[in-house]
Image (cartoon, helix red, strand yellow):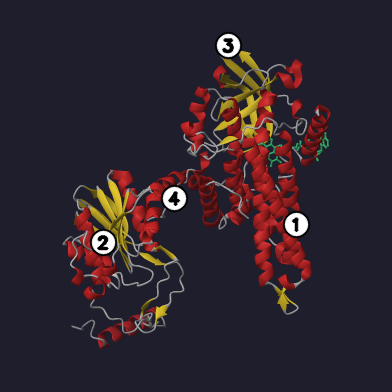
Amino acid sequence: MNIIVCVKQVPGTTDVKINKETNTIIRDEADIIINPFDEYAIEEGVRIKEKVGGSVTVISMGIPKTAELLREAIAVGVDDAVLLTDKAFAGSDTLATSYALSMGIKKIGGYDLIVCGKQATDGDTAQVGPSLAEKLGVPHTTNVRKIEEIKEGYIRCQRMTDDGFEVVEMPLPAVITVVKEINEPRLPSIKGKLKSKKYEVKIFNADDIGADKSLCGLNGSPTQVIKTFTPVHDINGEIIEGTAGEQAKNLADKLLAMQFVKCK
Amino acid sequence: MNYFLTEEQEMIKELAARIADEKIAPVALEYDREGKFPRDIIKYLADSDLCGVYIEEKYGGLGGGVLEMALVVEELSRACGGIALAFAGTGLGAFPIILFGTDEQKNKYLPDIAAGKKLAAFALTEADAGSDAAGIRTTAVADGDHYILNGTKQWITNGAEADIYTVIACTNRSKGARGFSAFIVEKGTPGLSFGKKEDKMGIRASSTCELIFEECRIPKENLLAREGMGFIVAMKTLDRTRPGVAAQALGIATGAFNAALKYSKEREQFGQPISSFQAVQHMLADMAIQIEAVRCLVYQTCRHIDSGAKNISKEAAMAKVFASDTAMRVTTDAVQIMGGYGYMKEYPVEKMMRDAKITQIYEGTNQIQRNVIALELIKESTRE
Ligand SMILES: Cc1cc2nc3c(=O)[nH]c(=O)nc-3n(C[C@H](O)[C@H](O)[C@H](O)COP(=O)(O)OP(=O)(O)OC[C@H]3O[C@@H](n4cnc5c(N)ncnc54)[C@H](O)[C@@H]3O)c2cc1C
């Protein structure tokens, strides 16, 4: 089973600064970490490999310094690391990112499963995973909290929902995005760290992966950030009081009034 | 301060520090309260390859020595001296095999220890033989292909939890300490049982337990070195693990200092942080000076030992005494700086002060260490 894990570099602090003019994140190149959700993706990839055999490759599109982060993945059991880096990729939105990743993944080839974190802690869009699946023309499942079964050409997983989970089956190759409930990422080992120190991350530019530059970076990014804000969830429930009988009647009246139910 | 650690030693220290901060610190107070043995933490150490830092590569370790062991103990002890002891106590049990084991014995036991699959323990002390270790009464009598052990060992770290025990017993009582021998006894051997688990002042996450041998038959190939070498096996082992106790003390002191420093900046009295009072500043400065001096002595002693030096008893004893006395002082001062809060169980320094105390007692009390140091000094001066 060949597994590819998509990894993003994000700011190491939770105190993300926004450029007021472009409404984009100001990235401090000195302080970057692996997107925390991607750590779960890496761990899941390594666990699948340990169970059914095969190999795990991490791929990232990012600044050259991201290579250092990809080495950390080698230290926890990943076999190979690929970094897509090119000035042409600068300013990518989720569409351009998933395009570049899809081209990089096609170049790697021969994959059965692609694992992504459910979202990145900086942009928080959760779009790259599904969008990547579309670009590659493979099925996907988001918010996976458990893989129940995985074998040649088949995966069955639990997809977390607001009030429980769904069981989803897919043929492979496919893309999944994982939530933090799926596992507890391991710490690196000394032997892994020693291996990662010697490891050379494979670096590809836009030409290496045959990317059409008009679809990369700012050129390929139709998104314009008008405003950033945290959505407010202000759906207030109403508590119906009274005796059981009164409550039932009150509730029935309300449902009737809202035309959710009908009287015959 | 640059301690001139190698890249691999830095890696070991960093990884141990991560386990201390991320995995141990959040549970240290609970494990202390409940007296819970840290199986889960050992798993993290094992998965990170840290269990074998001091074991040769051909037996699955990382090929380091006493310094590597000390670095791990120090970092873990910063978060909890008791939890760190599961690792350090295993080192104490493993060193007799590392130093005196045959290739077969090493092949049989060290890989599992290096992989963290098995823990070890070292059993010398008995009810009537503490400082005077030559007074042990446990016997081992040869019987065909076996030795039969009888007697009771007391206060054995990792007792009942460890799988591999190195045990010192008398094979020839008439010869005194020259009649002692060292044996490897596996948990599960008929005739080996465990007595009561002690309820201790500190290092409560460590298990301290009686080992009871009743007609316990062990195969002859489990003899370490030769008959009559037991006391030497014990002393040479302790020479290499006392710096480990020193590292434990160093870690505890560092943990207490860090807590006190942080608190002194946050706690305000008379309208200002208590760190602005010179009395507190000088205490902090003195704590830091002592810790720094300890760290330098401990690391350097470890390097001296790892270089293959012959005479190491005095040096190991000095590191152990200086570090443990410092830990006791620094943890007491940390409680003082934190005032009443420092005295409360909700804050870590109360526990650290209790944990520090043991480092002055075990692996030879500090009085006994001073005896060792003084005797060596006198011996050296007459030699000159
Ligand atoms: C928590 C814990 C864990 C332990 N783990 C282990 C273990 O894993 N394996 C093991 O074999 N042992 C272990 N021990 C035993 C430990 O090493 C002994 O407790 C220690 O050596 C001291 O012996 P004692 O307690 O019998 O004290 P004693 O020898 O009775 O000493 C009492 C006091 O008298 C002083 N004293 C004794 N003789 C002299 C002297 N000649 N000159 C000056 N002062 C002297 C001592 O310094 C001490 O202050 C452990 C003990 C504890 C408490």
Which one is in front in this view, the residue at disc 2 or the one at disc 4? 2
Which of A128/B314 is in front?
Answer: B314
- Which residue lies under the disc numbered 2? A205
- Which residue lies under the disc numbered 1? B332
Q: Is circle 3 on the same chain as circle 2?
A: no
Give the structural element (helix, strand or loop) at label 2. Answer: loop
Q: Return the disc, 2 or 4, that comes first in the chain's sequence.
A: 4
Give the structural element (helix, strand or loop) at label 3. Answer: loop
Q: Residues within 10 Å of mark 1 (few under 14, many from 20)?
A: many
Q: Which mark is residue B144?
A: 3
Disc 2 from disc 4: Cα separation: 29 Å
Which one is in front in this view, the residue at disc 4 or the one at disc 3? 4
Q: Which mark is residue A188?
A: 4
Give the structural element (helix, strand or loop) at label 1. Answer: helix
Q: Is circle 3 on the same chain as circle 1?
A: yes
Q: Chain of mark 3?
A: B
Residue B338: give x, y in percent of width and height: 72, 65
Which of B305/B54 is in front?
Answer: B305
Disc 3 from disc 1: Cα separation: 55 Å
Q: Residue at x 28, y 83 (%)?
A: A255
Q: Residue at x 44, y 46 (%)?
A: A194
* Relative horizontal placement of residue B118, taking residue A70 as reference (left or right): right
Q: Residues within 10 Å of mark 3 (few under 14, many from 20)?
A: few
Residue A220: give x, y in percent of width and height: 22, 73
Tag 4: amino acid: Pro
Q: Mark 3–mark 2 contact, CB under 8 Å?
A: no
Disc 3 from disc 2: Cα separation: 74 Å
Q: Mark 3–mark 1 contact, CB under 8 Å?
A: no
Tag 3: amino acid: Gly
Residue B46: give x, y in percent of width and height: 48, 43
